[in-house]
Amino acid sequence: MKKIFLLLVIGFAATTANAQKVKEAEVPAEVKAAFTKNYPNVKAKGWEKEDGNYEVEFDSNKNEMTLVIDPKGNVVQTETEIKVSELSKTITDYCAKNYAGKKIKEASKIVDAKGVVTYEAEIEKMDVLFDANGRFIKESKD
C-alpha cells in the first residue's frame, strides 16, 4: 500500500513539475528585463516555469507568441502562432497521412537561440514537430 501511495505521489509531482504557472512577482528581474528588452511595448498575458526556464505568453502585432527565457535572462526560443494554411505542403501531407481523420488545430513557428527554425502542428492533445524543410522530428503529448 505504501509503495502504491509513493508511486502516485511521484507521478503527480512529475506531471505538475512539467509546467507551472507563476505570478509575475515570482519571475526573476533578469527574465522580465529580457522580455521587456525584446518586446518593450507589450504586456505579458501570463508566466509559466518549465524545465527551469520561464515562458511568457503575449500578443505582438496581432500574433499570439511565447518567449522562453532562462533564469539568467537569455532567450532560449520564440514561438509564434501561425495559420495552419501557412504550414508547408510537406507538413500538411505528413499529418494527413499519419494522423488520418484528425485535424491540425493550431500551428506555430519556433525559432531557437541559434536561429534554427522548427514548426509545430497541434493535433488533438499532441504536438508534432518538423524541421524547416518539413521533415518530421518528433511528437509529444500535451
Image (tube, rainbow, N blue to C red):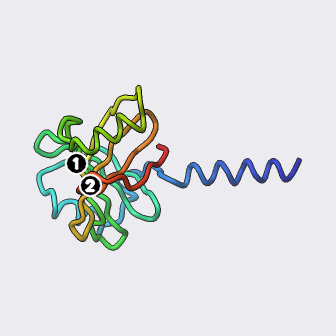
Please provide percent x and percent y for residue 58: 24, 46
Please provide percent x and percent y for residue 123: 39, 36
Q: Vertically, is 12 above or below 50?
A: above
**Label 1 sits on residue:** 80
Please provide percent x and percent y for residue 108: 26, 45
Q: Quadrant of residue 88?
A: top left
Q: Secondary structure at mark 1?
A: strand
> Relative to 76, is 99 on the left or the right?
right
Amino acid at the residue labelled 1: Thr
Q: Quadrant of residue 127?
A: top left
| Sequence order check, earlier mark of 2 and 1 | 1
Note whether residue 33 is visible.
no
Q: Secondary structure at mark 2?
A: strand
Tell me, for residue 109, which label it has, or none: none
Q: Residues within 10 Å of mark 2 (few under 14, many from 20)?
A: many
Which residue is at 22% across, 60% downward? 35
